[in-house]
Amino acid sequence: LEAVHVESDWTWEQAMRVIINDKRYGALKTLGERKQAFNEHLAQRRKQETEEKRFKQKKAREDFLAMLQESEELMSTMRWSKVTMLFADDSRFHAVERDREREELFEDYAVQLEHKERERAREGRKKNLIQYRALLESCDFIKANTQWRKVHDKLENDERCSCLDKIDQLEGFQEYIRDLEKQEDEDKKIQKEHHRRNERKNRDEFRKLLEEHRSSGFLTARVCWRDYSFKIKDHPAYLALCANSSGSTAKELFDDVFEELEKQYHEDKLRVKDFIKAVKIVVTPAWTFDKFKAVTAEACDFVEISEPNLKLVFEDLLDR
């Protein structure tokens, strides 16, 4: 039956005319066995034909989709009538027999194609915006307060600008201006912080100078600001502090130290006078400071009194 190509739609009579004289016809002894084998062959052949048809249809659909994917002219918005004209000479188009099935395959593919087109458009727009941003960054004349019209008039003929819609150009420009403003604000903050630190450093240096002069006796409770400022008017620490635009002034820092000096001087003076009174010492103009210091050295609690203050007390006693 297979050798003579008996098809699935043959009748027993058709098969008999072809196989009756074949010696293999007698392989089965009874007519019933022969008809049973014939019917089994028809069933097997129908099953095989169904599989072949299914495979052929599947292959036709795959080739049809491949044809759509290969086309560079095809667009998701294209009308079906135009699609049929586009692929009229392609055998893969006609391999799908039913026109409705061809149209459905195209419609399904068009949905996928639309997503790809949108994605390509997004990627293209993103790339163009990056190039446009680079163009804006290369223009030294663009500042945080530059107007859009001025920029557009200068750059409209540049392909990195013309490849974008005006609304995209405007949005890209506005975003760049916002970044410039943000950077400008950051720079101002950094500059302000740097300025603040410098001024604080200037105050610290002047405080350090005051402390050095206090320790050395150059600055005492008898030195007024007028005299002191005249003596240090050329000192770098004083000049730097005078350049400050905010914070404590040199005189204010001096007043803070002078107030402490004056308070400490009066306390030290009272302690020395109490000591002299207690031991009944009379300080005369003939006394030297070294003698006065030697006498007061007997009081161990005077160790805390600075020599400049002790000298001021001595001078005060001589004046009296």
Image (spheres, helix red, strand yellow):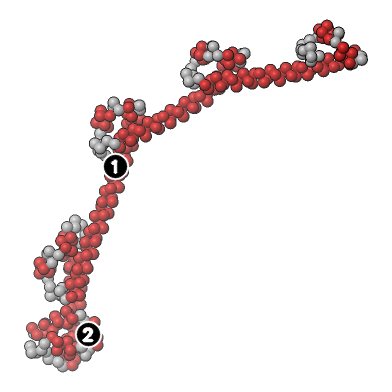
Give the quadrant of residue 280.
bottom left
Horizontal side of 9 relative to 138 (left or right) equals right
Disc number for residue 207:
none
Furthest residue in direction front, as rendered: 23
Horizontal side of 102 relative to 285 (left or right) equals right
Residue 55: tell me if it is visible: yes
Say what amino acid the circle numbered 2 marks.
Phe
Give 296 or 218, whichever is nearer the viewer.
218
Say what amino acid the circle numbered 1 marks.
Glu
Q: CA distance from mark 1 to mark 2?
A: 64 Å
Q: Could you tell me which quadrant the C terminus lies in?
A: bottom left
Horizontal side of 36 relative to 106 (left or right) equals right
Q: Residue at x 16, y 76 (%)?
A: 217
Pointer 1 and pointer 2: residues touching (CB < 8 Å)?
Answer: no
Residue 240 position (above or below residue 148): below
Instruction: Look at mark 1 in the image and give the residue it sits on.
Output: 181
Q: Residue at x 40, y 30 (%)?
A: 125
Residue 75: tell me if it is visible: no
Residue 142: percent from left, percent from top: 26, 36
Instruction: Look at mark 2 in the image and give the residue it sits on.
Output: 302
Residue 2: percent from left, percent from top: 79, 15
